[in-house]
């Protein structure tokens, strides 16, 4: 199995067992095998690799911007993967405001489904996660979430604990899901360092062979100047986020 330098050491240890089954009854074992097969083949075995981009406005994007999802999707297709981005939403935020409806991304040459919510905090997304994951049946969930919590002054430790609760909720709907957890990008309104550092412990305490977590440091090599408004990624920022997320997915490919 090829491993790339995108994960924390703890997460890499789990990757070595990423394709092992999860045990349990025959139905759950079968699901684990099928999911692992799709992940390890990047969707060329057992149907398309279903990936859910989950998060806030950085995942959703707004009118005039593609979000990182376009480059992410195109990276995987170029690598020979068979990918289906999944979620109950499509496109980008029409007005760049909470619940303002959707518009098509400027470049419509990618799968635009997602589960990104402009202005939402982690608890709000968690409240939706179980039903959305159950409906979309993702093999992999990408999580970039916590910016709004930290910007609004929430303690880093409690904000990180809420990410742990989100992971638990996602697994309640799919015990075999593979998770890519992002240390969030920097912004001009808050310091994200303490929150990002706390995510290592969240991932470590929840590692499972049937549902591995890779922690990807999206803050490394990323500056506030890669945001067009101090918070949301410009095209270069989108590319940086996409490259790290796609490398994480490809690290599971055999």
Image: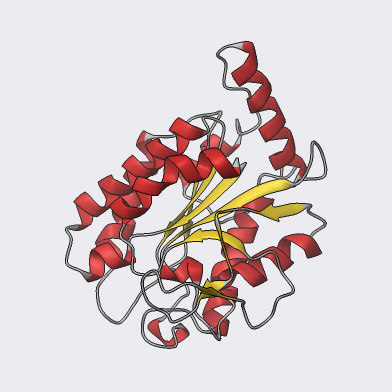
* Identity of the residue drawn at 82% across and 56% down: 80
Q: Which residue is outermost to the front?
A: 101
Residue 34 percent coordinates (x, y): 71, 30
| Left or right placement of residue 6 versus residue 40 in this view | left
Residue 9 percent coordinates (x, y): 48, 45
Does residue 54 appear anywhere in the picture? yes
- In which quadrant is the N terminus drawn? top right
Q: How is the image coloured?
A: secondary structure
Residue 69 percent coordinates (x, y): 60, 67
* Identity of the residue drawn at 60% across and 30% down: 17
Up the image or down, 242 lies above or below 214; here it is below
| Left or right placement of residue 24 versus residue 164 in this view | right
Up the image or down, 95 lies above or below 218; here it is below
- In which quadrant is the C terminus drawn? top right
| Left or right placement of residue 121 versus residue 83 in this view | left
* Total numbered circles: 0
Residue 180 percent coordinates (x, y): 52, 50
Which corner quadrant of the image does residue 178 belong to?
A: top right
* Identity of the residue drawn at 34% across and 46% down: 127
Does residue 213 appear anywhere in the picture? no
| Left or right placement of residue 178 versus residue 128 in this view | right
Which corner quadrant of the image does residue 33 belong to?
A: top right
* Identity of the residue drawn at 68% across and 21% down: 30
């Amino acid at each position: 199995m090829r491993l790339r330098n995108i994960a924390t050491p703890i997460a890499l240890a789990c990757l070595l067992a990423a394709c092992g089954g999860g045990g349990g009854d025959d139905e759950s074992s079968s699901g684990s095998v099928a999911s692992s097969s799709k992940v390890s083949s990047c969707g060329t075995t057992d149907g398309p690799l279903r990936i859910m981009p989950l998060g806030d406005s950085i995942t959703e994007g707004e009118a005039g911007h593609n979000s990182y999802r376009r480059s992410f999707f195109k990276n995987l297709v170029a690598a020979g993967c068979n990918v289906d981005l999944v979620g109950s939403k499509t496109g980008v935020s029409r007005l760049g405001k909470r619940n303002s409806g959707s518009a098509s991304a400027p470049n419509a040459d990618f799968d635009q489904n997602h589960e990104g919510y402009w202005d939402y905090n982690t608890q709000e997304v968690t409240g939706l996660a179980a039903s959305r994951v159950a409906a979309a049946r993702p093999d992999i969930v990408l999580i970039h979430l916590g910016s709004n919590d930290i910007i609004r002054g929430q303690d880093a430790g409690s904000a990180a604990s809420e990410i742990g609760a989100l992971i638990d909720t996602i697994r309640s709907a799919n015990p075999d899901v593979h998770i890519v957890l992002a240390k969030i990008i920097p912004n001009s309104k808050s310091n994200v360092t303490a929150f990002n550092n706390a995510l290592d412990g969240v991932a470590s305490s929840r590692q499972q062979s049937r549902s591995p977590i890779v922690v990807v440091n999206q803050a490394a090599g990323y500056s506030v100047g890669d945001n067009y408004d101090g918070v949301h990624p410009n095209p270069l920022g989108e590319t940086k986020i996409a490259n790290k997320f796609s490398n994480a997915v490809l690290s599971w490919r055999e």
